[in-house]
Image: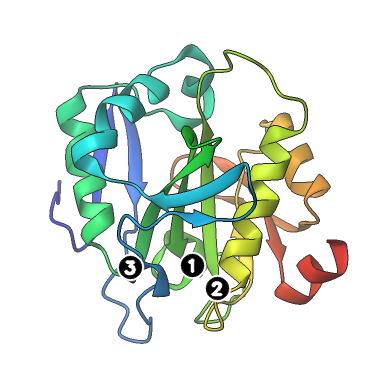
Amino acid sequence: MDTGCAGFAIYFAGSLKTVYMNKNDSLAKPLPFKTIGNQIISVNKELGFRSFDPQTDLNLLHNWVNQDYAQAFWQMRGSIGLLRSCYQCIMQNPYAHSFIGLHGGNPICQFDLYKVAVDELAALVNHEQQDCGFHLLMAPNQQPIHGLTLSLIKAFLGFYFSMDSTGSMFAEPDAQNDKSIRLLENAGFQRITTVAMSYKTAHVYSLTKEQFLCNR
């Protein structure tokens, strides 16, 4: 099994999690988000984003991915050492980036962003070189706030589409993940196909910048 940062697969609790397998695509340009460092990008008074920091955020994320609600679709239950290896590579990969979402200054979610052109999704859907995809993991729901997850998705999309060099946003929820599917559709995403990926059957959704701006 290749565990180098050029593209790798890691096992969590017996499940294969493939991560950015085709990084050596010479046509892909690095993500523009690598330069923000630990700068906090404030979207409004309540919501903001910063880069994931493996040194300070790893224990927090390890707790989140080992929650029961995260198991059905994230399949990342395992040692903190495996998680560290995974996210060190993601943060070093010019075609992927991870963010911590903030609510009132406190960590509330995590977004993984990746270039579609260097992911296995590239062989399954029509895409442009600048298009990206994302995954979202929410923190344990201690004090539910109605509409918070949808607000975070829309805020992240606003942040993403504020970059001139970004293309459409893709999402590939598990076909059985009804909650994620509803959230994506409420955020304005359009379903374009259903595909068999290496670790799931997924409904593929996309959203252009123009569609996002029309739905705001």
Instruction: Tell me if residue 47 comes above or below residue 59 in the rendering.
Output: below
- What's under tag 1, amino acid-wise? Val
Per the image, the residue denoted by label 2 is 131
Q: Sequence-wise, which precedes: disc 1 or disc 2?
A: 1
Answer with the quarter of the image where residue 56 lies: top left
Instruction: Tell me if residue 135 comes above or below residue 96 in the rendering.
Output: above
- What's under tag 2, amino acid-wise? Asp
Badges 1 and 2: C-beta atoms under 8 Å apart? yes
Extreme bottom residue here?
27
- What's under tag 3, amino acid-wise? Lys
The residue positioned 45% from the left and 73% from the top of the image is: 117
> Do we see residue 79 in this rendering?
yes
Label 1 residue SS: helix
Q: Which mark is residue 116?
A: 1
Distance of mark 1 from mark 3, alpha carbons?
17 Å
Image mark count = 3
Distance of mark 2 from mark 3, alpha carbons?
16 Å
> Do we see residue 203 in this rendering?
no
Label 3 residue SS: helix
Per the image, the residue denoted by label 3 is 34
Please tell me which residue lies in front, 69 or 1: 69
The residue positioned 71% from the left and 24% from the top of the image is: 145
